[in-house]
Amino acid sequence: MTEDIQKACEIMQAGGIILYPTDTIWGIGCDATNEKAVQKVYELKKRTDNKAMLVLTDSSAKLSMYVSDMPDIAWDLIEVADKPLTIIYPHAKNLAGNLLGEDGSVGIRVTNEEFSRRLCERFRKPLVSTSANVSGEPSPG
């Protein structure tokens, strides 16, 4: 697993995209702070860039790096969640602009799945996470 994580980090550092397991699906991902990499994901999925995509991070402690206004209820939900939980936060920051909703919001999930968590830790940046399918088509089983 260590070699796979290292290779994925090298690809993302160079602005590339990866296929990787998450806590819910096999996802297409990239550096969530790199607008050109995010654009590659939109193009691969044949998806318009006005449809925001999800961001993964490995720790709730890192949320304040990407969200300007962290509602108290979000901390409570993260603490009690026993399944993957994506929260839509207003006022995203330090992320690729083409990743955000029209209102500047962003969906972020703190991953507990081992590979994606270790990948986020090693990469030291949040990752885009979107299903590995063409937009509008079924996800691979």
Image (spheres, rainbow, N blue to C red):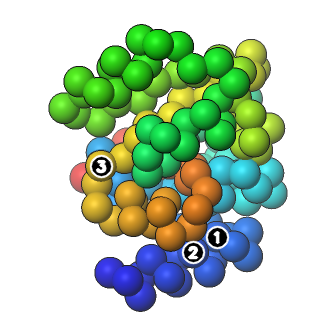
Please, what secondary structure does the residue beneath circle 1 have?
helix
Report whether residue 48 is seen: no
Residue situated in front as seen by the camera: 28 or 71: 71
Q: Amino acid at mark 1?
A: Met
Q: Quadrant of residue 102?
A: top right
Q: CA distance from mark 3 to mark 1?
A: 21 Å
Q: Is residue 14 above or below residue 70?
A: below
Q: Position of residue 128 (x, y in %)?
A: 57, 50
Q: Residue at x 76, y 55 (%)?
A: 34
Circle 2 packing at 10 Å, graded few (<14), some (14-19), many (20+), is: many
Q: Residue at x 42, y 11 (%)?
A: 73
Q: Amino acid at mark 2?
A: Cys
Q: CA distance from mark 2 to mark 1?
A: 5 Å
Q: Amino acid at mark 3?
A: Asn
Given the current orientation, which residue lies at the most extreme bottom position?
3
Return the disc, 2 or 3, that comes first in the chain's sequence. 2
Q: Position of residue 83 (x, y in %)?
A: 22, 33
Return the disc, 3 or 1, that comes first in the chain's sequence. 1
Left or right position of 9 against 14: left
Q: Residue at x 56, y 67 (%)?
A: 123
Residue depth check, mark 3 versus mark 1: number of the one nearer the observer: 3
Q: Are the residues at dot 2 and dot 3 in contact (C-beta closer than 8 Å)? A: no
Per the image, the residue denoted by label 3 is 112
Q: Is residue 80 above or below residue 18?
A: above
Q: Is residue 32 above or below residue 84?
A: below
Q: Position of residue 27 (x, y in %)?
A: 43, 55
Given the current orientation, which residue lies at the most extreme left position?
82
Per the image, the residue denoted by label 2 is 9
Quadrant, the N terminus: bottom left
Q: Position of residue 98 (x, y in %)?
A: 77, 39
Q: Using the image, tell me which numbered label, if any, was put on residue 12.
A: 1
Left or right position of 19 against 99: left
